[in-house]
Image (cartoon, rainbow, N blue to C red):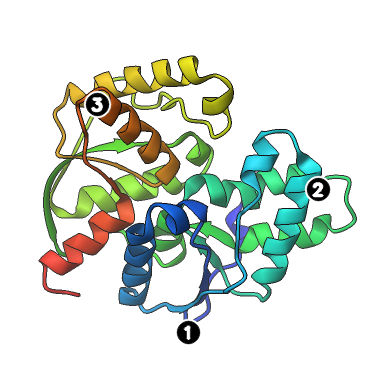
């Protein structure tokens, strides 16, 4: 998506937050961290009560009619003109990329595309909409940063890496095959569990080789998959959403 077509925040920095299903069910603190860092940056947040899912599970499973129903609900729920911020690369990509594919022959395609132009993944928004290139505070951690597949072709992974690397005390560790998929892939992990686990195990081997304190990503689904595999192997690995790292850095620096 070109910058010329994207919706940027106005001077009052009003935004809407799409918290995602995984925040709702498993990662509430990632949502809290997102709110805290956006408010620290002067954003005025709105949280539409009727939000549910972005429609990605049905889309990935091939049930596009069901997915379109969920997407239409999402667009109605997040009515307005302000940016919609999503702390998930995969959910954001669903709204600004995949939804346009499944609505290609639908009469409401222009409305879906307009919503996609308003949708930002969190790190992409902080760096490329608000212009924040460095992050204050401090966090003592050796970090392995996982680049989720759904952020490929976007500016999100580079934005996350830039922010994490700028935090005093954080060392972002390079590791082997860092661009490799974690193996989750949503319904892929259900349909092909052995392949999915094998891919995740290979990813974990490379991550463990650099002995990080934290595994960090912008996609909670990847973190859930890798943490679950590590736990099953009896070698638990501490994980955090990148928003939690930024929030903790602010708290450690006395800024929150």
Q: Where does label 3 land, which residue?
A: 207
Mark closer to the chain start, 1 or 3: 1
| Left or right of residue 104, residue 254 in this image | left
* x, y percent for residue 44: 45, 81
User: Rounded to the nearest whole Å, what is the CA distance between mark 2 and mark 3?
Assistant: 38 Å
Question: Circle 3 — which element?
Answer: helix
Camera-side mark, 1 or 3: 3
Residue 176 vs residue 188, the one in the foreground: 188
* Alpha carbon separation for disc pair 1 and 3: 41 Å
Q: Is residue 254 above or below residue 225?
A: below
- List x then y, in percent, for residue 233: 26, 22
Q: Residues within 10 Å of mark 2 (few under 14, many from 20)?
A: many
Identify the residue position indicated by label 2 in the image: 103
Q: Quadrant of residue 236?
A: top left
Give the residue displayed 18% in from the left and 55% down from the top. 167
Judge depth for marks 1 and 2 and give the one in front.
2
The quarter of the picture where residue 217 lies is top left
Residue where numbered disc 1 is placed:
12
Q: Cβ–Cβ below 8 Å for labels 1 and 2?
A: no
Earlier in the chain: of badge 1 and badge 2, it is 1
Q: Is residue 163 left or right of residue 148?
A: left
């Amino acid at each position: 998506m070109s910058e010329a077509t994207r919706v940027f925040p106005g001077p009052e920095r009003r935004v809407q937050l799409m918290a995602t299903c995984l925040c709702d069910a498993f990662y509430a603190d990632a949502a809290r961290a997102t709110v805290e860092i956006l408010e620290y940056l002067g954003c005025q947040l709105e949280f539409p009560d009727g939000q549910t899912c972005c429609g990605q599970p049905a889309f990935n499973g091939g049930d596009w009619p069901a997915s379109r129903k969920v997407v239409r609900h999402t667009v109605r729920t997040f009515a307005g003109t302000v940016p919609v911020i999503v702390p998930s690369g995969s959910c954001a990509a669903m709204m600004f990329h995949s939804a346009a594919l499944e609505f290609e022959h639908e009469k409401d395609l222009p409305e879906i595309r307009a919503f996609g132009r308003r949708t930002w993944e969190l790190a992409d928004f902080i760096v490329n909409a608000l212009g924040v290139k460095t992050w204050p505070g401090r966090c003592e951690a050796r970090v392995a940063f996982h680049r989720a597949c759904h952020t490929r072709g976007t500016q999100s992974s580079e934005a996350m890496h830039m922010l994490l690397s700028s935090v005093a005390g954080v060392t972002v560790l390079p590791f082997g095959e860092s661009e490799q998929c974690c193996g989750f892939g949503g319904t892929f992990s259900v349909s092909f569990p052995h392949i999915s686990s094998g891919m995740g195990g290979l990813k974990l081997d490379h991550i463990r080789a650099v002995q990080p304190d934290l595994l960090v990503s912008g996609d909670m689904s990847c973190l859930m998959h890798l943490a679950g595999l590590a736990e099953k192997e009896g070698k638990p690995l501490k994980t955090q959403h990148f928003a939690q790292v930024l929030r903790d850095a602010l708290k450690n620096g006395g800024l929150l």
